[in-house]
Amino acid sequence: MSRRNCYVRKTDDGELAVGTPYDPRFLTELKRAVPVHQRRFDGTTREWIVSSNNVAVVGDIIIKVYGQSVALPEVVHHTSVTRTETYEVRYIGRAKIRDGAPATSYGFCNGEWMVVFPEVVMRAWFNEPQSEDIPRNLYSVLGIAQQSSADEIKSAFRRMARQWHPDVCKEDGAAERFMRIKEASEVLMDDNKRARYDAGLALELIAETSVPKNKKKPVNADDFTKLYAPPLRCGNVTVTGKFSLDRFVVDKIEAWSDITRDGKTLVTSWPIGAERFIEEWV
Amino acid sequence: MISTSLVVGSMAQVAHQSGKSMAETFVGADAVLIVDCSRSMEQRDSLGGKQRYEVAVSELARIQSSNPGKFAVIAFATMAYFCPGGNLISPAGTTNLADALRMARIADVAGMRFIVISDGEPNSETDALNEARKFVGRIDAVYVGPENDIDGGRAFLDKLVRANGRGGIRVVADRVKELAAQLEVLMIQAPERQV
């Protein structure tokens, strides 16, 4: 084990850089006390970068784990200000649970994975159920609300079909997803079928409240993964949220539009086994 | 109490088999069966001394299995229940047809038909007739009481299809016998004739 002492210094950005000998107890305590988006490990300097608001917490952990009282830098406690930003996000990954915190997806923007989308925020924007255990309905397959107009349904279909067309999209399960999008549009773009489907949804709701629930997970074509993946992988996304350690943590998605160039639209996907996502202009 | 096992050809069974939701399966439905499960359905005057209810269960199972995904079932007694698995509730209580029609009206979309299957008069004739008048879709009726009982449930069902005013008809399946066959007849018959 390294014998180096613990220290806490202030970074150029006013955050904390924390150096300690390796001890799993420190890691456990840090993860327990500091929210996931207020800390990150810098592999180059081998330091933990921690939001300056946690200066006292970090000092306490070092005393608890290493029995050392370290000098703590004077820092300006910043209150995170909620702001609205628009990012050209080139790819959004699958949501993952990080250190026990609620699942988040990272969005790649300006050459960095710097926009953090909580799964719950993404699902709300795309009108999807808040769990993989609840099957998507046809509206959520297209990422729209049940009250959507015929034009909105048409435009959502075009966008989803472009994203998931197997000739373009190299994501796992793209062909199945594309078929599902087609099926959804066939029902929702036909007024009579849509009225019947809406009636079916209402009856389904009645059945759920009057019949004991079947414990077995319902069979559903959309359930090919347990890791949530947003139905669109890129876009100009207007978001409300807060900066934390150079990342923007999204509280709410306000708008989402296609990234276009010379009359073409960007579609991105990540082939299985590839090191990076690929971009296609269609 | 509703059984949770699935009748072959019921909405839920077809949905399960195709991997689709019940709502998607309902897109292909032809009719909603509104089935009386009040206490009078316990009478043992049907085929071979069986209860009308027992015969109704097997007749409905038969028509659902020969027309998979085409019939949705609402059962009613004191309350109405949607039965996606195609099973009926156990017979008990009163005949709250108005409640069942209110529930069925959720599915009152273009081209959907409604068939009331009952052996008696409802708790409130006025409420039931008022509900029937609100339907855009056609309501037919199958009287499943004794054939020789002219004035009771049969007369009411005649009023019901007239109140609906969409050209529906009322047929008789004496004490539930041949209910499935009568339903098949209804689904293909011209709407003008009273049987």
Image: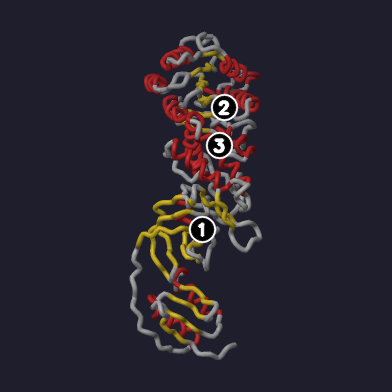
The type of colouring in the image is secondary structure
Contact (Cβ within 8 Å) of mark 2 with mark 1: no
Residue B22 image label: 3
Q: Is residue B177 visible?
A: no
Using the numbered discs, state the Cα–Cα distance from disc 2 to disc 1 in whole angstroms. 47 Å
Q: Name the residue under label 2.
A: B71
Q: Residue A271 occupies which quadrant of the picture? A: bottom right
Residue A90 image label: 1
Circle 2 residues within 10 Å: few <14, some 14–19, many ≥20: many
**Residue B93 vertical position relative to residue A147 in the rendered view, above or below:** above
- Residue located 42% across and 39% down the image: A147
Chain of the residue under label 3: B
Chain of the residue under label 2: B
Amino acid at circle 2 = Phe
Circle 3 residues within 10 Å: few <14, some 14–19, many ≥20: many
Q: Name the spot of residue A157 as percent of width and height, x first.
A: 51, 41
Q: Name the spot of residue A14 as percent of width and height, x first.
A: 38, 78
Viewed as shown, does residue A176 lie left or right of A10? right
Amino acid at circle 3 = Met
**Residue A15 vertical position relative to residue A264 in the rendered view, above or below:** below
Q: Name the spot of residue B140 as percent of width and height, x first.
A: 50, 17
